[in-house]
Image: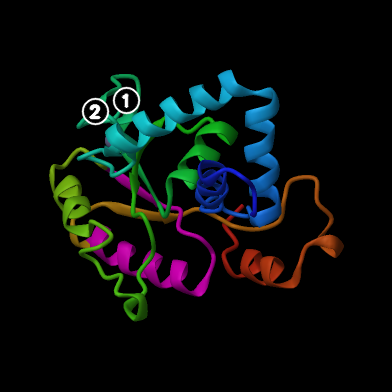
Amino acid sequence: MTTGSRLLGELVEALRCLPGVGNKSAQRMALHLLERERAGGRRLAVALEEAMQRIGNCTRCRNFSEEPVCALCASDSRDRGVLCVLESPSDLAAIEQATGYRGQYFVLLGHLSPLDGLGPEELGLDLLVRRLEEGEVQEMIIATNPTVEGEATAHYLGQLARAAGVRPTRLAHGVPLGGELEYVDRSTLAHASGTRQAL
Ligand SMILES: [Zn+2]
């Protein structure tokens, strides 16, 4: 953006690192902060700086945390016999908000993808295996995404669980509640029918 301010140009450029934010929206955001929301802008700057400095990964589940062990892992009220394995912190947030799940989690931060250099080590599977071998976990719910890579990862995780004497289960993906089959997309329906459960 051509303005009289070098700093404004830098702010616009920096905002463009956000997903879905192009030059125009970045410009709108920067001008909005300067014109009408200076206090909010300062709060945003402090929150960003703190979060980037202090948030790391939980040493037990790899979820984001500013403590060595996150609140979910440290909690006494979570069932330590059930471990839900997911690809990302956003999947964890979705399960936490949408279900009454009371077990614990393990976050892979990705899925197996040899072409992208993502192998067992990058997904922290050594940490997961150590966790399973502690003997507390009875059931491992595999909640990777229903994509080709997610399914391959699920298959691999199932083998790890069985080797450690833990029962693997797969989160069923499929028809939304209240949905009519007619309106469900074909791949979802195919997957739902492939992963049907006993009634
Ligand atoms: Zn944790």
Residue 119 left/right relative to 37:
left
Across and down, in percent, residue 62 comes to: 28, 44
Q: Evaluate if marks 2 and 1 touch, with contact meaning CB atoms under 8 Å apart.
A: yes
Residue range corresponding to the magenta coloring: 138-162
Q: Distance between the residues labelled 2 and 1?
A: 8 Å
**Residue 141 belongs to the span the image colors magenta:** yes
Which quadrant is home to the N terminus? bottom right
Across and down, in percent, residue 143 comes to: 46, 53
The 10 Å Cα crowd at callout 1, few under 14, some 14 to 19, many 20 or more, is: few
Location of mark 2 (residue): 67
Query: Ligand 1 sits in which quadrant?
Result: top left
Q: Which of marks 2 and 1 is in front?
A: 2
Q: What residue type is labelled 2?
A: Glu
Looking at the magenta stretch, what is its main secondary structure?
helix
Q: Residue at x 70, y 42 (%)?
A: 28
Location of mark 1 (residue): 71
Query: According to the image, what is the colour scheme of the structure?
Result: rainbow
Across and down, in percent, residue 87 comes to: 42, 55
Helix, strand or loop under label 2: loop
